[in-house]
Amino acid sequence: MGMKVLITVVYLFTAVSAASAESLPIYFGTYTGGGSSSKGIYRSVLDLETGKLSDPVLAVEAANPSFLETHPNGKFLYAVSELGGAGSVSAFTIESDTGNLRLLNKQPSGGAGPCHVSIDHTGRNLLVANYGGGSASVIPIKADGRLGEPTGFVQHEGSGVNPKRQSGPHAHSINVSPDNRFAFVADLGIDKIMIYRLDGEKGTIVANDPPFAQVKPGAGPRRFVFHPSGKFAYVINELGGTVTAFAYEPASGALTEIQTVTTLPKGFQGSNACAEIRVHPSGKFLYGSNRGHDSIVVYRIDAAKGTLTFVEHETTDIKTPRNFNIVPTGKFCLVANQDGDSVVVFRIDPETGALEPTGHKVSVGRPVCVRFLQRNSIK
C-alpha cells in the first residue's frame, strides 16, 4: 500500500468515527480455515445514507474469530477463537487513527467451542457461551480493556431427542436482561433457555428460580433477544426452524411462551438450520435467518401482545446467512453470507419491515459476524 493510499485510509476511518451521524464503522468476524480466503477480523465503513460499504480491510490476523462484540465505550473489541480443544477469548484495543485492532490479552473461555460473547450493561463483564463444552462463563473486563481471570462459570447437563445434535448440552448464546439482573443462556442441546441471576459487581452467575424456560423437544434454541420494551423476548430454534415468543417477567426473570411460528415457507422440504435473530430498533419487526432455505424471514410484532405475523422471506443474494445485524438507525440490515463470501446490504421499509436490496455488496472470506462500533455513556 502506497503512502498516499495509507493516509487516505487513516483519514477515512478517523473522519467517519467522528461523523457517526453519516457513517458507521463495522467489523466482520470470519472463519479462517478450510480454504477460506479470510485471515482474521475485517473492518469496513457503512454510509448511513446510501447503504454502501467500503472495501473491507484486515484489522487484525486471528484464527477463526467467529463471533465478536464491541465494548460500549467504543475502545475495545472482543472475539472468541472457535478452535478445537479448550476455547479462548481475545481482547483487542481499537486504534483510534486507523480502526485496526491490537491484541491486549487472552483468557480461557471455560469450555470447548466458544461461539457467542456479550457484554453486560455496566461494561464490566464479558459473558461467553461455550457450544462444545455446554457451559457459560463470566470474565471481568479491566479498565484498560484487558480480560481478567474468569469469575463466574456454569456447566449444563442433559441431552435432547436429536441424537446427532443433542447428545449433550450446547450453550449457543448468552444475553443479559435489560436491568442487568439476569443472564439467559440458550442451550441447543437440552432445549432450554437457562436463567441465571447475574451479580455484576462480583461477576458471578447462579441458578435462578425459575431455573429455565422449556421449548419444544428437538427445537434446538440458538439465539435469544429482548424486545426494546422489555416485555417480551424471542428465541430462534436452529433445529426446529421456528421462533418462540415469550412474555417476560422482570421481577423473577421468568419466560412464559406465548407463540411459536415457523421460519420457513409452507411446503419447504429441504434441510435448514436457523441462525440469528434480531428485533428492529423500533420494536415493530423481528428478523431471523435460515441456512438451507437461504433467507431472512421477516415478521411484524404486535406491540401489545408480542405476537408475530409473517411479512416475507427475502432471498436476494443470500447464501448461508450465519449472522446479520440491523444498524442503530433501523434503516439498513447487513447480512453475512458464510458460504457466499460476502456481506450484502438491504434497506428496511419503515412501514412494513420488508427488506429491499440496495445493490451494495462487499467480498469477505466466510463472514459469520457483523458488529458496529458505537460509543455510549459508558467511559
Image (cartoon, rainbow, N blue to C red):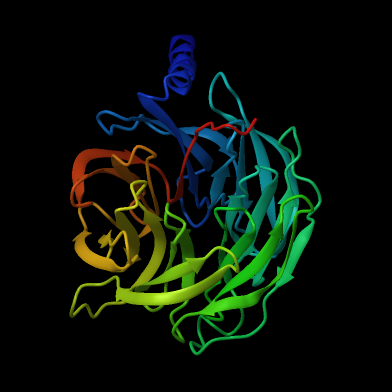
| Residue nearer the viewer, 14 or 36 | 14
Q: Residue at x 43, y 14 (%)?
A: 8
Asked whether, in this view, residue 264 is left or right of residue 112, the answer is left
| Residue nearer the viewer, 232 or 313 | 232
Residue 260 in percent (x, y) is at: 35, 76
When asked about the image quadrant of residue 186, the answer is: bottom right
| Residue nearer the viewer, 44 or 117 | 117
Question: Considering only vertical position in the picture, is 288 above or below 179?
Answer: below
Label tally: 0
**Res. 86 visible in picture:** no
When asked about the image quadrant of residue 253, the answer is: bottom right
**Res. 16 visible in picture:** yes
Asked whether, in this view, residue 201 is left or right of residue 315, the answer is right
Residue 172 in percent (x, y) is at: 55, 66
Asked whether, in this view, residue 181 is left or right of residue 45, the answer is right
Residue 162 in percent (x, y) is at: 48, 87
When asked about the image quadrant of residue 143, the answer is: top right
Question: Considering only vertical position in the picture, is 40 above or below 235?
Answer: above
Question: Considering only vertical position in the picture, is 116 above or below 97?
Answer: below
Asked whether, in this view, residue 316 is left or right of residue 338, the answer is left
Q: Residue at x 63, y 49 (%)?
A: 120
Residue 83 in percent (x, y) is at: 62, 59
Question: Considering only vertical position in the picture, is 179 above or below 13?
Answer: below
User: Which quadrant of the figure contains the C terminus?
Assistant: top right
| Extreme-top residue of the structure | 4
